[in-house]
Amino acid sequence: MKIIYKKFLIVSTIAIFIGGVYLYFSGNLNSETIIPVALGSSLSSSTGTVTTSETSSSVGDKISSDISFLTTLVSLKKIQIDTSLFTNESFKLLKNNVVKIEPVTAGRVNPFAPISATKPNTVVTTPSVVTDQPTQITDKTAILNGTVNTTSGVTDTYFEYGKTATLGSITLTVEQSLVGTFIKNVSGLTPKTNYFFKACAKINNVALCGEVVSFTTN
């Protein structure tokens, strides 16, 4: 009889313990509330634990700053334009300090052209063509350079070159830059040979050429 009574007590104790545990956890589950999740946060478990990328204090600071910003926006409707500034004595004493720019004589039309005997500030009105020194001379090639002092009425720019001062060869028409310079890379030259060339341009249907310049290939 005693053995049966002891077994009954043990079973009853276990049943009461299990029932208490069940009631305890079921009470916690029923008491859980929905926790708002801020932008950038995520739920880590089903027990209501929320993991956020920011601390609660920083979130509170942001909310406070947002409220302050909205308050400022609302207060903007109270702004009034005060026109009393225009009647202030200090405003009336303001002066116009605009400096008048007097017209001056223009400089050279093409600042990259060789300096001639004319005065730098003298505007050259007569169209002219200048033969500049060649560049990048090799045994078989060279770049010929020329300048025209106007960009108006120019229809063609080209070079005449040859092994004698009488020239002979004429390059194809080359494009003129915005400042009046034009170049042409000539090839097929003979090594260690003296060459002559001049820059030419057709301006208002008149062919004008610069002086003849010589160079020697490598």
Image (tube, rainbow, N blue to C red):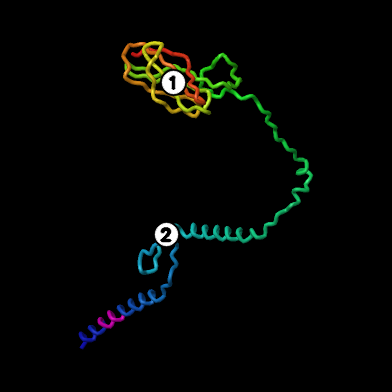
- Is 47 placed left or right of 66 in the picture? left
Report x, y in % for residue 195. Answer: 38, 13
Please identify the quarter of the rendering in which residue 7 is found: bottom left
Report x, y in % for residue 80. Answer: 70, 56
Quadrant location, the N terminus:
bottom left
Residue drawn at 75 percent across, 48 percent down: 86
Residue drawn at 33 percent across, 77 percent down: 22
Q: Is residue 117 magenta?
A: no
Residue 110: mark? none
Residue 145: mark? 1
Question: Which residue bears the numbered disc 2?
Answer: 40
- Is 73 placed left or right of 87 in the picture? left
Q: Report the amino acid beneath label 1.
A: Asn
Q: Report the amino acid beneath label 2.
A: Gly
Question: Relative to 104, is 2 above or below?
Answer: below
Foreground label between 1 and 2 = 1
Q: Which residues are magenta?
A: 10-16
Please identify the quarter of the rendering in which residue 92 is found: top right
Circle 2 — which element? loop
